[in-house]
Amino acid sequence: MTIRSYGGGGGRGGGGLSLGFPPFTRAVKRLVIANASVYLLMLILGAVAPGLAGAITGLAALLPVAVAHGWIWQLVTYSFLHVGLFHVLFNMLTLWMFGSQLERDWGHRQFFEFYFYCAIAAALVTVGISYLGTAPGFGFLGIGPLTVTVGASGAIYGVMVAFAVLHGDQEFMLFPLPFMIKAKYLVGILLFISLAGAFQGMGPGRRGESVAYFAHLGGALLGWVYVRFLPRGGLRFGASERYFGIRNAYYRWKRRRAARKFEVYMRKNDRAEFFDEHGNYRPPDDKGNGESRRPPWVN
């Protein structure tokens, strides 16, 4: 468990160091409530209606062969299922500790976008690795398309990597160990553990154990790419900016084309009769002899 440190006084030597939890921001709160609610609901269904609980798990958990046959909703729904109390507890505490600062940096809409992109990226990596395990020469992976994956860990690792990139010098205390560690080193250690676990879990005798670790790494990779290379406002903002840029360029092209057609028409109909020396429109009955019904408008 980690506890964030907040420095006071604006400098290393000024003020004291206080320990505490970050605020419960809007998106983080909703994600924690959603994951906890789904976990509790599945726990109750597993006790009173195990058949229904199994059917829901079959529909929502990530099964690569099902995704390949069109069950694409599993790329998101799997992240709301967890297999134990400590599984969901660790993920939600980590989301709270790291995600709240990112949401304050980006806003709740962009944070939602980022979180679910990381979850989807982790799922796609899982599907790809699962099918790669069936290819000739990759049997050492020991996994296949029938391996089931659940949990929000892929999205959580994306959140942690983004935090490490943007706030790498922020210090944490590893409770109950009495020492501080910077976020970039803490996240680096967790990534090393996932990478080691991915390769350690390979082999026919440990089928499927490495899939979750590869999902962690897939989410972490998307978190790094998102922060480093995507538009500051996020993919949604970048796409909307691109759309409006193309639309405005199209409208400008239409106006230029209409202007050229109008110029051709005016040349055929004595342009000087309709425009003054300032380029302002002049009615046909205004001959410019000082007897205009109204003075020309000059910009």
Image: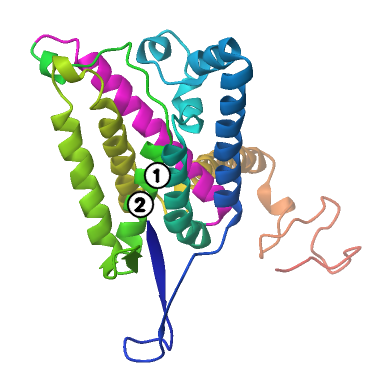
| The furthest residue to the front | 47
Color theme of the render: rainbow
| The furthest residue to the bottom | 14
- Which secondary structure type mostly characterizes the magenta part of the structure? helix
In the picture of the structure, the residue carrying the numbered disc 1 is: 156
Characterize the local packing of mark 1: few (<14), some (14-19) or many (20 or more) Cα atoms within 10 angstroms.
Answer: many
The answer to whether the residue labelled 1 contacts the one labelled 2, judged by CB atoms less than 8 Å apart, is yes
Task: Name the secondary structure under disc 2.
Answer: helix
Q: Which mark is residue 298?
A: none
In the picture of the structure, the residue carrying the numbered disc 2 is: 160
Residue 64 seen in render: yes
Residue 257 seen in render: no
Instruction: Give the residue type that dot 2 points to.
Output: Met
Magenta residue check for 128? yes
Counting from the top left corner in percent of width and height, residue 239 is at 48, 41
Counting from the top left corner in percent of width and height, residue 214 is at 26, 31
Position above or below: 22 against 115: below
Position above or below: 107 against 113: below
Residue 3: image quadrant is bottom left
Give the residue at x 70% y 68%. 299
Span colored in magenta: 107-136
Give the residue at x 22% y 53%. 188
Instruction: Give the residue type that dot 1 points to.
Output: Ile
Q: Nearer the viewer, residue 84 or 215?
A: 84
Give the residue at x 32% y 86%. 12
Task: Name the secondary structure under disc 1.
Answer: helix
